[in-house]
Image (cartoon, grey):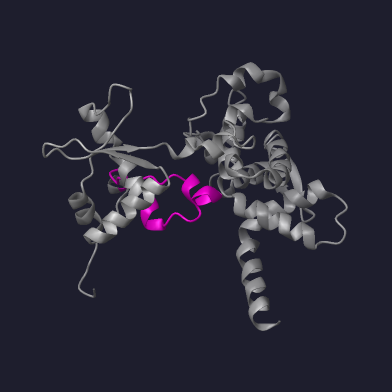
């Protein structure tokens, strides 16, 4: 491997990179906990073949999209043996994530790739609902009709405005002075729901995480030109908003909730949550490293 020498990426080359998208639900929902990582990767490659399906109009009489992905192609792509391919395909079939239909006459087998988000157990779970059906924020209570029209599959959130304002933790005064610029709170509440994986939580976890989510929404409604106290230090609300939108994930929220359980007396839970969430980006890893060390060596 020492003789391998790869070039550095240039900004232009980054735009040309193609990716395989892996559904987050395969890793976050307990239903798929025992599905092997290899099978999840194969499933993602199968979904990527929808591009060919669209191009070649591979749609049956029932409006169901199908793909072609032969055993030989899978072996070549993943550099694995025949037995491994058979095992992975069987695994996906056991989870009903794919359905194969033989055509005979030497033609390749048709593969229907099932929608992993439409599993019956997920669909029947009252805590797994479309984003547009979840409460957004206090300022949107009177906009239920607009929420209902929100496309639940729209994951392309425009962060240009807030990123431009707070780039490198500095405020661009020219933009601040432009009173016509506005922040679309609808987009940001949807983004928060995505970041906190609200759609994939069970009932008990949803209740606790949703309370934190509402407080984060409250922060987003504040004037970004104002200040807020973080550990008794004034911090631009805009900086807090940027961190909440771009850096805080479900892991950070769970970490903060764990910390609250260890606190005997928290007088202002809202203030504590906002400060802890803002600081969690720099403290979470250290907290869990110390916890692991204590569990291994101090017990």
- Residue 206 quadrant: top right
160 left or right, relative to 81: right
- Residue 174 quadrant: top right
Can residue 7 be spotted in the picture? no
Kindly give the residue lying farthest to the top in the view shown: 145
Residue 216, magenta (yes or no): no
Q: In percent of the image, x 27 and y 29: which residue is there?
A: 54
Can residue 193 be spotted in the picture? yes
Is residue 145 shown above or below 50? above
268 left or right, relative to 45: right
Is residue 161 shown above or below 150? below
At which x and y percent is residue 249?
59, 49
Q: In percent of the image, x 63 and y 54: which residue is there?
A: 252
270 left or right, relative to 201: right
Q: Of residues 126 and 171, which is closer to you in this image? A: 126
Q: Of residues 114 and 156, which is closer to you in this image? A: 114
Residue 28, magenta (yes or no): yes
Q: In percent of the image, x 33 and y 54: which residue is there?
A: 88
At which x and y percent is residue 77?
23, 54
- Residue 266 quadrant: bottom right
Looking at the rendering, the stretch of residues picked out in magenta corresponds to 14-40
In the rendered view of the protein, which quadrant contains the C terminus?
A: bottom right
In the rendered view of the protein, which quadrant contains the N terminus?
A: bottom left
**Marker count (numbered):** 0
Is residue 101 shown above or below 298? above
At which x and y percent is residue 22?
40, 47
33 left or right, relative to 97: right
Q: In percent of the image, x 52 and y 36: which residue is there?
A: 120
At which x and y percent is residue 271?
80, 48
Is residue 115 shown above or below 78? above
């Amino acid at each position: 491997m020492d003789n391998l020498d790869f070039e550095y990426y240039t900004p232009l080359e980054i735009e040309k990179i193609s990716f395989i998208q892996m559904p987050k639900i395969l890793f976050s929902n307990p239903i798929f906990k025992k599905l092997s990582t290899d099978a999840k990767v194969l499933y993602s490659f199968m979904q990527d073949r929808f591009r060919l399906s669209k191009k070649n109009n591979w749609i049956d009489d029932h409006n169901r999209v199908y793909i072609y992905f032969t055993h030989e192609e899978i072996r070549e792509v993943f550099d694995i043996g025949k037995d491994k391919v058979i095992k992975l395909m069987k695994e996906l079939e056991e989870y009903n994530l794919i359905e194969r239909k033989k055509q005979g006459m030497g033609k390749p087998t048709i593969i229907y790739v099932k929608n992993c988000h439409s599993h019956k157990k997920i669909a029947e779970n009252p805590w797994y609902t479309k984003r547009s059906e979840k409460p957004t924020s206090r300022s949107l209570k009177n906009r239920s009709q607009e929420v209902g029209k929100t496309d639940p599959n729209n994951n392309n959130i425009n962060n240009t405005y807030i990123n431009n304002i707070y780039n490198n933790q500095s405020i661009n005064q020219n933009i601040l002075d432009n009173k016509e610029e506005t922040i679309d709170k609808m987009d940001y509440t949807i983004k928060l729901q995505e970041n906190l994986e609200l759609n994939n939580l069970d009932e008990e976890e949803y209740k606790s995480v949703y309370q934190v989510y509402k407080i984060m929404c409250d922060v987003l409604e504040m004037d970004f030109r104002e200040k807020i106290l973080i550990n008794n230090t004034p911090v631009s609300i805009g900086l807090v908003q940027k961190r909440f939108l771009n850096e805080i994930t479900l892991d950070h929220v769970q970490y903060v909730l764990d910390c609250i359980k260890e606190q005997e007396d928290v007088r202002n839970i809202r203030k504590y949550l906002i400060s802890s969430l803002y600081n969690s980006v720099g403290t979470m890893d250290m907290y869990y490293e110390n916890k692991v060390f204590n569990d291994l060596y101090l017990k």
